[in-house]
């Protein structure tokens, strides 16, 4: 089967050619790669169309191009052109994604479309695939389309228009795989659904095995340096906690990186790594006793779910996190919750987990069985077959 995968993927070349580092999501990148690889290994052909969006407003045109540094030699990636002008950027990306999708389909027809979230490029391609081509569309639903990352409803004409379009797409997709039951509940009950919180890559499993599960007194944060991720609060909380013989390792990059670096520069126990290679990140995760997700508490539980929680658990770390909706009981055995991400709360939770040696409670075995590559590949294949079978019946 030939699959068009419409995503916000950000590979090495687009980072070099466009100023997108500030909004770069390593977790989205890794998850898209893992899903594409699993589909390819199941004998499907996958082509990724990405908007590679430039968020810094400027009067400059960035032409589209093919990625040259591929994560897999048989998975091609095309970045549509970008025109980062206010009120035009999103619509332009949507129009260009549809144009490229049409062109690739004319050259060699697609059998299935997967869209990653509900931005303009995904909405445009899904609409064309359903209305003009009659193709089945699967929504990979990561972030609630109807509220912000903080769980609040956003106002404004453009927001209301996009919400209306998102509702229309939710009622027309052939299937949905989402990171939380809350997101799956937004779909009509007859639509095939699949709860997919994340994928633990082979590199995590192999690296942890090579390191013989030897853990150090390390707390690791991995993620984009934005306000909602609570890194500033984490650094302040770390200072309050005063944990001797422990280190806090912070990876990632974003709009707050320099501010965070200055805040942490006088603390010898805080190691600021910045952007690191995938190999270095995996080794850090596998060496840590504790990993943290200090995301701001949402007013709508389950509107997002941090992919890194699955990776943290898969690496054998105990996870400290704010609530992110209802989780499986087996997963929660490896988690200690914080009611909020205030610095005092973070400090108290860190001290409790260290002093009570809660870091010894993990959920790695369950996560490997549920979200390891073999398990996800089998579940994904069954789900795709279910969607195609149902789509074929309804089109008769």
Image: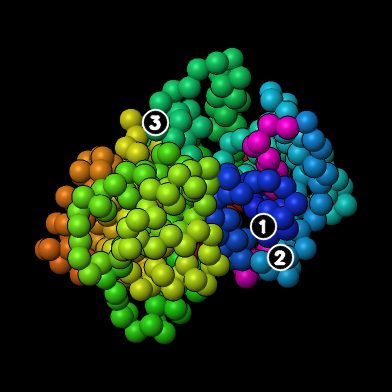
Q: Residue furthest left?
A: 356
Q: Which mark is residue 11?
A: 1
| Spatial separation of the CA atoms under disc 3 and disc 2 | 35 Å
Are dots 1 and 2 in contact, CB under 8 Å? yes
Q: Position of residue 170 (x, y in %)?
A: 55, 33
Residue 270 drawn at (x, y percent): 35, 60
Q: Residue at x 35, y 73 (%)?
A: 287
Is residue 53 in the magenta section?
yes
> Residue pushed farthest right?
107
Q: Residue at x 55, y 50 (%)?
A: 25
Q: Residue at x 81, y 37 (%)?
A: 61
The residue at the far top in this view is: 157
Mark 3: few/some/many CA within 10 Å (<14, 14-19, 20+): some
Quadrant of the rendering where the C terminus is positioned: top right
Instruction: Assign a secondary structure to mark 1.
Output: loop
Q: Does any portion of residue 16 appear in the rendered image?
A: yes
Left or right: where does residue 38 sit relative to residue 76?
left
Q: Position of residue 385 (x, y in %)?
A: 58, 56
> How many numbered tags mark residues here?
3
Q: Secondary structure at mark 2?
A: loop
Q: Nearer the viewer, residue 131 or 242?
A: 242
Q: Is residue 300 magenta?
A: no
Magenta-colored span: 39-58
- Residue that carries the numbered disc 2 in the rendered image: 70
The crowding category of the residue bearing disc 2, from other C-alpha atoms within 10 Å (few below 14, some 14 to 19, many at least 20), is some
Mark carried by residue 151: 3
Counting other residues with Cα less than 10 Å from the Cα at mark 1, is it few (<14), some (14-19), or many (20 or more)? Answer: many
Q: Nearer the viewer, residue 353 or 161?
A: 353
């Amino acid at each position: 089967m030939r699959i068009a995968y419409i995503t916000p993927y950000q590979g090495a070349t687009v980072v070099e050619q466009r100023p997108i580092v500030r909004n770069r999501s390593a977790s989205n990148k890794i998850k898209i790669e893992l899903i594409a690889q699993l589909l390819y290994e199941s004998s499907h052909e996958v082509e990724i169309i990405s908007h590679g969006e430039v968020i810094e407003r400027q009067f400059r045109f960035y032409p589209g191009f093919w990625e040259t540094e591929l994560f897999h030699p048989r998975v091609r990636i095309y970045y549509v052109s970008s025109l980062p002008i206010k009120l035009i950027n999103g619509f332009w990306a949507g129009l260009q994604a549809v144009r490229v999708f049409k062109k690739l389909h004319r050259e060699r027809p697609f059998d299935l479309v997967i869209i990653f979230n509900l931005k303009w490029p995904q909405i445009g391609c899904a609409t064309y695939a359903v209305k003009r081509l009659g193709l089945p569309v699967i929504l990979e639903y990561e972030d609630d389309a109807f509220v912000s990352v903080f769980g609040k409803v956003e106002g404004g004409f453009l927001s209301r228009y996009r919400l209306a379009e998102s509702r229309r797409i939710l009622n027309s997709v052939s299937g949905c795989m989402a990171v939380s039951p809350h997101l799956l509940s937004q779909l009509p009950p007859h639509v095939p659904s699949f709860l997919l919180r994340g994928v633990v890559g082979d590199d995590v499993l192999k690296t942890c095995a090579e390191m013989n599960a030897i853990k150090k007194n390390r707390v690791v944060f991995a993620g984009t340096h934005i306000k909602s991720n609570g890194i500033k609060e984490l650094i302040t909380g770390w200072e309050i906690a005063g944990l001797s013989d422990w280190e806090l390792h912070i990876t990632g990059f974003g709009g707050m990186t320099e501010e965070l670096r200055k805040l942490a520069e006088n603390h010898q126990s805080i190691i600021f790594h910045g952007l690191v290679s995938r190999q270095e990140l995996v080794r850090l995760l596998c060496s840590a006793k504790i990993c943290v997700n200090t995301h701001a508490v949402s007013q709508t539980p389950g509107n997002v779910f941090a992919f890194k929680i699955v990776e943290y658990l898969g690496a054998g770390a105990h996870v400290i996190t704010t609530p992110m909706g209802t989780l499986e009981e087996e997963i929660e055995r490896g988690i200690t919750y914080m009611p909020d991400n205030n610095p005092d709360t973070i400090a108290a939770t860190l001290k409790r987990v260290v002093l009570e040696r809660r870091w010894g409670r993990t959920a790695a075995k369950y996560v490997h069985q549920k979200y390891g590559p073999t398990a996800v590949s089998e579940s994904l294949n069954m789900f795709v077959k279910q969607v195609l079978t149902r789509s074929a019946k309804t089109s008769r």
